[in-house]
Image (tube, rainbow, N blue to C red):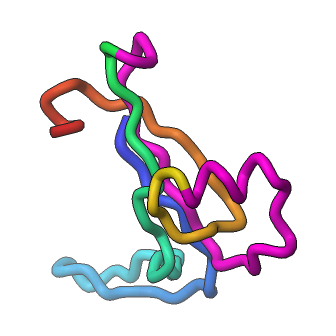
Amino acid sequence: MKGLIGKKIGMTQIWGDDGMFVPVTVIDTNSCVVVGKRTAEKDKYTAVALGFGEVKEKHLTKAMSTHYKKSNAPARALVTEFRVGADDLA
């Protein structure tokens, strides 16, 4: 499963070729970044960790702060893993 993390901005509609409108959701994914990778050799599965939403370092636990520094990733408020195949991880 591939995915993104975002924040719902609102609803709108677009017009189709047949003249009918389709309701759509507008999602902001500007601050969604990759903060980590899980490999089969090290973690026994392959996944991508995505982070969303900026957060100040003083609001993080010491463990999360160390994790972000170790991986040279920006601090994020929400982190979610999405399992991917080994070929997608590369």
Q: Residue at x 48, y 63 (%)?
A: 73
Q: Residue at x 32, y 16 (%)?
A: 40
- Residue 24 in view in this figure: no
In the drawing, does residue 57 fall left or right of residue 40? right
In the drawing, does residue 55 fall left or right of residue 87? right
Q: Which residue is drawn at 36% across and 43% down?
A: 2
The span picked out in magenta is 42-69
Image quarter where the C terminus lies is top left
Seen in the picture, residue 76 relative to 86 is either above or below; the reply is: below
Image quarter where the N terminus lies is top left
How many badges with numbers are in the image?
0
Q: Is residue 49 covered in magenta?
A: yes
Q: Provide residue 25's location: percent of width, then percent of height.
A: 53, 76
Q: Provide residue 64's location: percent of width, then percent of height.
A: 72, 52
Q: Is residue 5 covered in magenta?
A: no
Q: Residue at x 38, y 40 (%)?
A: 37
Seen in the picture, residue 14 relative to 42 is either above or below; the reply is: below
Task: Using the rendered view, name the quadrant where residue 13 is placed.
Answer: bottom left
Q: Provide residue 39's location: percent of width, then percent of height.
A: 34, 25
